[in-house]
Image (cartoon, rainbow, N blue to C red):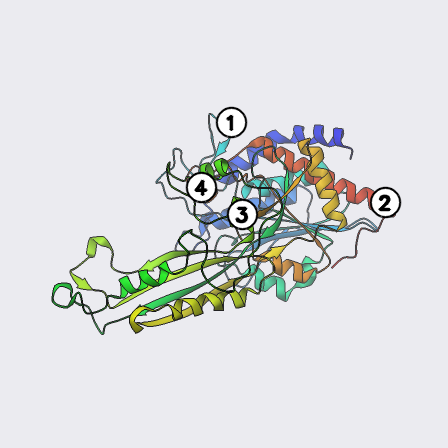
Amino acid sequence: MDTATARTTVGQLMPDVLTDLRRLVGHASVAFPGFPPEPVHAMAADVLDLFRAAGIADARLLDLGAGYPSVYGEIPAPPGAPTVLLYAHYDVQPAPKQGWTSDPWTATDGPDGRIHGRGVADDKSGVVAHLATLRAFGGTPPVGVKILVEGEEETISHLEAYVEAHPALFACDAFVIADMGNVRVGEPALTTHLRGDVSCTVTVSTLAAPVHSGLFGGAAPDALIALARILATLHTPDGDVAIEGLHSHDWSGADFPEADFRTAAGVLDGVDLVGTGTVASRLWARPSVTAIGLDAPNTAEAANILIPTATAKISMRVVPGCDPERELQLLMDHLESHAPGNVKVETKRVKVGHPFEVDLTGPAIGAARDGLSAAFGKPASVIGSGGSIPLVAYLKKAAPNADVILWGAEDLARAAIHAPDESVDPAEIERIILAQVLMLSALGAAARAGADPGAVG
């Protein structure tokens, strides 16, 4: 399909694409433990029906043995053509009412032309982009297509173990992971780096039991204060991570403009950013460490006592090229070695999520860059992501020779994924669909012309 035909075809599909997106936002598909399961299962069933109608007759729910199912299906490749696996996820983050200016479970048109609602960008935009890509070819694409729509990307995933146990299902020549976005709307970019996510807990103990803060304070050690002192050692005065030996480098691709970053992150006026170097280096090429949880008395129940035990959960993002197991051990060693006054410190490993770096030399990567450039009308740049998609490493293990394309409609500057008033620009979805259509068309044309499309798996 040539560019002009593809552009017209995708444009004609957009009303149905947005109708589907609005309906899908209505499913409160939060897969976190403690949330109702019915909306998640309803979402899975809706996605399944949509992909069957789009041409994947064998689309089905994969029973992962626990948790929520994934939607999977396949259209076999024409002779000599490669196979492309299209990935997205249908589960979403929770949506507390605080901060929302509209109902998070109702797709709402904003005055900025964007559609607002939980999951409208992350990642229901990816789901409808894949649907539209299939519809553009009338359900008979020029390459083989596998679809994989996960139901637990935002929480504890059971899909990773399933991929390890059933690698043949995921064998392909290229993965298209539609769970990313450009820095700005209309500025095309391929994501090439994903940071990994490692985490642990650290527990500080100082006393056998709580004691009176007046009678004993000033001599007896308080566990919460000791824990705070340990956490303060994780960063230098400039805000850089102070853990020795971590893998780190500078980013050489496109930068993330500071003004855009401040807006996207909601940094308050007058508050300094942390760390040194370019924003892109800090986000995409260097580690970051955060205390994401704390077990200690809350202020409403505070008593005049010294705290005997306090625990924090620490999350650290690690960069491509590192051994995440080693990085986690360095974090735990740092926490244990910076105990003030010989307080008792215990660390426990929670999880290890691997970072990922894209090989930019494959045939599908070239077709993807060309498709992006044609769809957006300007050359595609290369960016990273500070976030993590641990599944990518498992998929790559199942198909080690496959290219990995990371893109999507979740623009970093304004989409507010995981935050109140999440939104998406409909034009960005349209351009990503067009890029996918052009990429598949190019891969199919190369196969018909006798070019080597790559070996499956």
Disc 3 residue type? Tyr
Mark 1: which secondary structure?
A: loop
Disc 2 residue type? Arg
Residue annotated with mark 1 = 113
Residue annotated with mark 3 = 90
Mark 3: which secondary structure?
A: loop
Disc 4 residue type? Ala
x, y percent for residue 306: 20, 65
Disc 1 residue type? Gly
Question: Residue 448 has which mark?
Answer: 2
Placement of 373 over or under 146, stated as above or below: above
Please tell me which of labels 1 and 2 falls first in the chain: 1
Judged from this view, the residue extending furthest toward the top is 111
In-image side of 36 versus 137 (left or right):
left
Q: How far, Cα to Cα, is label 1 from label 3?
A: 24 Å
Residue annotated with mark 4 = 265
Judged from this view, the residue extending furthest toward the left is 215
Mark 2: which secondary structure?
A: helix
Q: How many marks?
A: 4
Tell me which residue sits at (66%, 53%) in the image.
Answer: 358
Please tell me which of labels 1 and 3 falls first in the chain: 3
- The answer to whether residue 139 shows anywhere in this view is no
Frontmost of labels 4 and 3 is 4
In-image side of 8 versus 20 (left or right):
right
Which quadrant, please, contains the C terminus?
A: bottom right
